[in-house]
Image (tube, grey):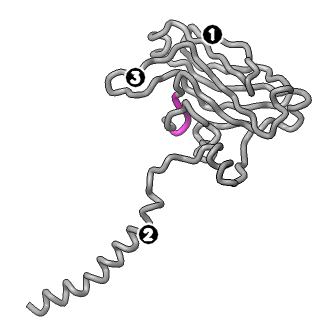
Amino acid sequence: MKQAFSTRRSRLPLLAGGLVLALALAPLGCNREPKTAKVIAAEGEAPALASTVRTSEISQEPQLLDGFYSIEGNSWRWTAKQFRVVLRPPIGAGQSGATLDMALTVPQVAIDHAKSLTLSASVEGSPLPPETYTKAGQYEYKRDAPASALGKPVVRINFSLDNAIPPTGAERRELGIIVTSIGLQPK
């Protein structure tokens, strides 16, 4: 009897220590929402914004303002019907402009749903020419962005699709297109 009591007593500090360690590490495992560029700026931190965002890079996720879903296949993300990013314009873009370049995939399921998708974009409110896709496949949406829209250290780019797959059944997301990267390239 004395043996069993002393064994339990010797485990008590070990269990208490494990509990303290688990509580100390718990915040590291939380599934908190990533900070957006807006939250980082409001907190006074200086974000290191990129001119090109790869949707697979967790470190660049704050530049994906809204309309992007979680990373899939370690390399891409679905978008909603409308989605936004912030990018750092390349050096000299305020004088010579830049090229907006987005690598995207139009999935067959999107074409089956809508027959065609038209993608529109604007840089700081300046509209860019839209593009219509009638076949599934990988594409590059490439448009000249005017210098007048690129004079700030951070620019907001809004994208919009004319159609999206609405949430149905187990899929609760509105699905637009698949994006792997968005960037502003110097001219």
User: Pointer 2: residues within 10 angstroms few (<14), some, or many (20+)?
Assistant: few
User: Secondary structure beneath disc 1?
Assistant: strand
Q: Amino acid at mark 1?
A: Thr
The residue at 64%/37% (across/down) is 54
Q: Position of residue 149 (x, y in %)?
A: 81, 27
Q: Residue furthest bottom?
A: 2
Q: Nearer the viewer, residue 30 or 133?
A: 30
Marks 3 and 1 in Cβ contact (< 8 Å)? no
Q: Mark 1 or mark 2, which is nearer the start of the sequence?
A: 2
Q: Amino acid at mark 3?
A: Pro
* Distance in Å between CA atoms under marks 3 and 2: 39 Å
To which quarter of the image does residue 134 belong?
top right
Which residue in the protein does label 1 denote?
132
Magenta stretch: helix, strand or loop mostly: loop
> The magenta stretch spans which residues?
73-78
Q: Mark 1 or mark 3, which is nearer the start of the sequence?
A: 1
Q: Is residue 135 left or right of residue 151?
A: left
Q: Position of residue 127 (x, y in %)?
A: 73, 18
User: Secondary structure beneath disc 3?
Assistant: loop
To which quarter of the image does residue 91 belong?
top right
User: Pointer 3: residues within 10 angstroms few (<14), some, or many (20+)?
Assistant: few
* Distance in Å between CA atoms under marks 2 and 1: 52 Å
Q: Amino acid at mark 2?
A: Ala
Quadrant of the drawing holding the N terminus: bottom left
The residue at 52%/25% (across/down) is 80
Which residue in the protein does label 3 denote?
167
Which residue in the protein does label 2 denote?
24
The residue at 62%/47% (across/down) is 39
User: Pointer 1: residues within 10 angstroms few (<14), some, or many (20+)?
Assistant: few
Q: Position of residue 106 (x, y in %)?
A: 55, 18
User: Secondary structure beneath disc 2?
Assistant: helix
